[in-house]
Image (spheres, helix red, strand yellow):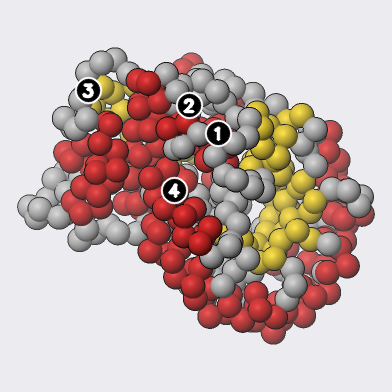
Amino acid sequence: MRIENIEAIVLSESNIRANVADSSQDALIIRIYTDEGIVGLGEVDSSPYLVKAVIDGVRSSHLIANNIRDLLIGQDPFNVISIWDQLYLGTMYYGRRGVVIHAMSGIDIALWDIIGKALNRPICQLLGGARHSKIRAYASVLMPSTPSEVLAVVDRCLAEGFTAIKLGWGSLGENPKKTIELVKAARSAAGKEIEILIDLGLVDGRWDVATLVDLIKRLEEYEIFWIEEPLSPDDLEGYAKLAKAVDTRIATGEELSTRFAFRDLLDRGQVDVIQPDVTRVGGFTEFRRILDMAQLRGIPVVPHGWSTGIVRAANLQILAGMSNPLFLEYCVTESALNRKLVKNPFIVRNGFVDVPDGPGLGVDIDEDLMNRMRVR
Ligand code: MG
């Protein structure tokens, strides 16, 4: 089998709300076409236009400053891990982290989708076999700014069948007093039995470790499952100090790409939970290596996932193979890309979502919606 063409497709809503942490308003979808008629599907949750440029860009003069398209055309998709290494090396001068690895992630997801479709097997079986047919999901939602809005958001998630809810960003980082007020409202709205997770989204590092230790200790009475992103992703020493000083789990990792970055997070950052995003970290190929590293250190891995049903399906394929999966992150924002681009509905039943069992990712795209939202 040979790769004949790659499409990097930018989808977008016509009116993007700026300055909110909702990347499901636009998307970068990848389709890889083969000479046997099999088409692989992938996605990247990053800056769509930059990822497209990395894939389609004009070839430069140096051997290790290539574009991805030229490196891929003519390859056999079954050489997926070798292709990963070739792309990494072939873009080394301007790649190695960030947007190039994001682009490689979408390519890698699409290649595994092709292999699954060629063998008529779901990706979880290609990665070693499914241990689980359904995964507990947490509703992932932006934190509103008042206790009454928190109540409405929590009620909506419970009505959809979730038994765990993560509230993130929004008004959580305004000041510690407000944070406590909002977390308290979430706990009282959810009751005792529901897991509450809090994503502070303080990636600008605006609060120091001492402030965070005090805050997180004061939040203990609300029994929060984890506190996510209290610090800048680069403040690994801060993470280590904080994780040591508090009992509540500290989680992070959605900004990182490659196993090299996760090695540093695990060994220097000493956090309790890591959250690689399969569409940013280097696809299934790199995610699997990170799972192995985390398992060696006894650290749980909960895939980060926002954006469309493609990410949801990819994460379910990964989680299905894990011995003790904690959660699927299930973005509940009402955008068309999140809810409708993939036809599979991913229904939540008693808090769990079924792992797609069709070949590859096991999802189908709504072609009409994609054509309507395509901007490049
Ligand atoms: Mg987050």
Circles 4 and 1, Cβ within 8 Å, touching? The answer is no
- Look at label 3 and name its amino acid: Met
Q: CA distance from mark 4 to mark 2?
A: 16 Å
Query: What is the x, y in percent for residue 158?
Result: 83, 38
Q: Residues within 10 Å of mark 3 (few under 14, many from 20)?
A: some
- The earlier-in-sequence mark between 1 and 3 is 3
Q: CA distance from mark 4 to mark 1?
A: 14 Å
Report which residue position mark 4 lands on: 288
Q: Which mark is residue 130?
A: 1
Q: Secondary structure at mark 1?
A: loop
Report which residue position mark 2 lands on: 122
Residue at horizontal 87 percent and vertical 55 percent from the top: 187
Query: Which residue is at the front of the view, 145 or 255?
Result: 255
Measured along the vertical axis of the image, is residue 56 above or below residue 340? below
The yes-or-no answer for disc 2 within 8 Å of ligand 1 is no
Query: What is the x, y in percent for residue 190?
Result: 88, 48
- Look at label 4 and name its amino acid: Arg
- The earlier-in-sequence mark between 3 and 4 is 3
Query: Which residue is at the front of the view, 29 or 10?
Result: 29
The yes-or-no answer for disc 1 within 8 Å of ligand 1 is no
In this picture, residue 217 sits left or right of residue 239: right
Q: Secondary structure at mark 3?
A: loop
- In this view, the mark in front (4 or 1): 1
- Look at label 1 and name its amino acid: Ala
Report which residue position mark 3 lands on: 1
Q: Residues within 10 Å of mark 1 (few under 14, many from 20)?
A: many
Q: Residues within 10 Å of mark 2 (few under 14, many from 20)?
A: many
Which quadrant does the N terminus fall into? top left
